[in-house]
Amino acid sequence: MTRIPGREAIARKGWLRAHKWLLLRRASQLGLLLLFALGPWLGIWVVKGTLTSSRTLDTLPLTDPFFLLQSLAAGHPPYREALIGAAIVIAFYLLVGGRVYCAWACPMNIVTDAAAWLRRRLKLHSARATSPSMRYWLLGAILVASFASGTLAWEWINPVSLLHRGLLFGLGAAWAIVLGVFLYDLLVATKGWCGHLCPMGATYSLLNVSGLPKVSALRRAACDDCLDCYAVCPEPQVIRPALKGDGSPIVSSINCTHCGRCIDVCAQDVFQMTTRFHHRRDGHEQGTDHIADRLGCGSARPVQ
Amino acid sequence: MSDPGTSPTEADGARRSTAARRRFLSQVAAAGGAALVGLGLGAYARQASALPGFAVRPPGALDERAFLGACVRCGLCVRACPYDTLKLSAFGDGVAPGTPYFEPRKVPCEMCPDIPCVAACPTGALDRGLEDIGKARMGLAVLIDRETCLNFNGLRCDVCYRVCPLIDRAITLDMQRNLRTGKHAMFIPVVHSDACTGCGKCERACVLEVAAIKVLPTRQAKGELGHHYRLGWEEKAKAGRSLLPQDVLELPVRRPGGGS
């Protein structure tokens, strides 16, 4: 009786096409992890450091903007190379879309995807989730706490950096925190971590304003209301304005992670990966949607 | 927030205002929750910010509190360390997670002249102002247990003194009479804070089961003289003569058995 999201797409498009974006993402996530791990595991040093700050081939510096923010709030302006590293990262994500980090780079995504998958399989139904805008409040609170304590406040418990660093330098007791996130997503709140709480994701959402690639419900007329896309989307509130509104079919919410899973599971091929300039209809501009919708805290009212 | 609808019926309006109220309340709950988390983190950071005794920060590290605000926990210094001295703290190690430290009793700092760990730090948590490794102050060695130290027991162990990269400056041997035997000498290792970098070679080399000499955070190891104190002999050396007028003080000389 219960529908398994993606089943129909597999039957219609074949397994490979119904997992195309998922496979690409896993390749990207694992490939990135491998680049970092080649050094400590095999002694081949391509990238040194971690996702927080790294050096590629001993030249290219990269620094995570969320860490820079915390450090600045704590009252410590870093050396120029960390600033340059952050500028490069910010420029990159302004170009490709901030939350691309969450779906394509962040190692925690594999954990929360696993929890979401298991949750669907076990048919656990949603319990209490916090408001999706919780992460922005949390981001603000962390910056205040960093300022007040003079330390990088989130780094005492940040599950994302604990996991990534743990894989490269030794996990310690961080497995308990990662397990906590998994269980939270599995038993407490659907998509609770990535979709509601993670302040690192919130930082990347704030950079998700000008990315070129965009998911678009280009063939929304073909939608047969099966709800599979809502079931797999890590941020289901972002779909509705594009799919059911009568404005632009582009998913323009800053919380869209560009994971492309909606494209995979749609048996009707409603969604496509396009660019933000693709298919503007009747002079509808991007910016007409309500700011509250873009922050994911508004109602699901149609765009315009 | 204004509603975009053109002519809402009253029931519609009421429903919308209920929805708006619910939205507002969920925002208040989220803000409150976030504030609580922030408070908790702030309070936790305050009490967890002290470095535990077994851990020593890399050379050039800022003062512990400033360090925790500057270090982005990237591990580049650890990767730069050629001797695997530095480790990155894992969650539950007792040191702020993701920050670099070393345990001198296990692997001490080899004091590389080019200080690669400092050069690798992208943020300045390890200060590039440190150009001479001899000026590093990672901590301070303290001969903390006189009861077990072999030299204090009259033996000529001297290992801490011999391995010190700044021998005769950071550690000297101070000859004293051995009052227990009455006829031997004791060579007491003395650490000098103006030269000791806290590299930990002495602690590593101490032959005891548990080292009698240990590197401690400088703040814990050092006393501080009241700022108004003047050491007479130093003032005398500076002035080139005694600062006391010679005829001011005349104290009676008392000898045992009366007589003066």
Image (cartoon, coloured by chain):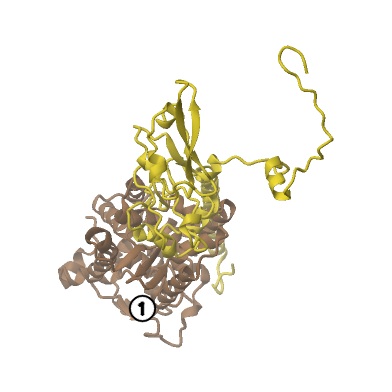
Chain colours: A brown, B yellow
- Which residue: 17% across, 72% down? A13
Residue A30 placed where, x, y %?
Answer: 25, 64
Disc 1 secondary structure class: strand
- Which residue: 47% across, 83% down? A285
Decide: few, some or many residues near mark 1? Use Cα within 10 Å; few <14, some 14-19, many ≥20. Answer: some
In the rendered image, the residue lying farthest to the bottom is A283
Question: Is any part of residue B5 visible from this angle?
Answer: yes
Residue A261 placed where, x, y %?
Answer: 28, 68
In the rendered image, the vertical position of residue B204 relative to residue A195, given as above or below: above
- Which residue: 36% across, 77% down? A214
In the rendered image, the residue lying farthest to the top is B257
Residue A222 placed where, x, y %?
Answer: 28, 76
In the rendered image, the vertical position of residue B73 relative to residue B235, given as above or below: below
Amino acid type at image mark 1: Pro
* Residue A89 in which image quadrant: bottom left
* Residue A248 in which image quadrant: bottom left
The residue singled out by tag 1 in the image is A213
- Which residue: 30% across, 62% down? A232
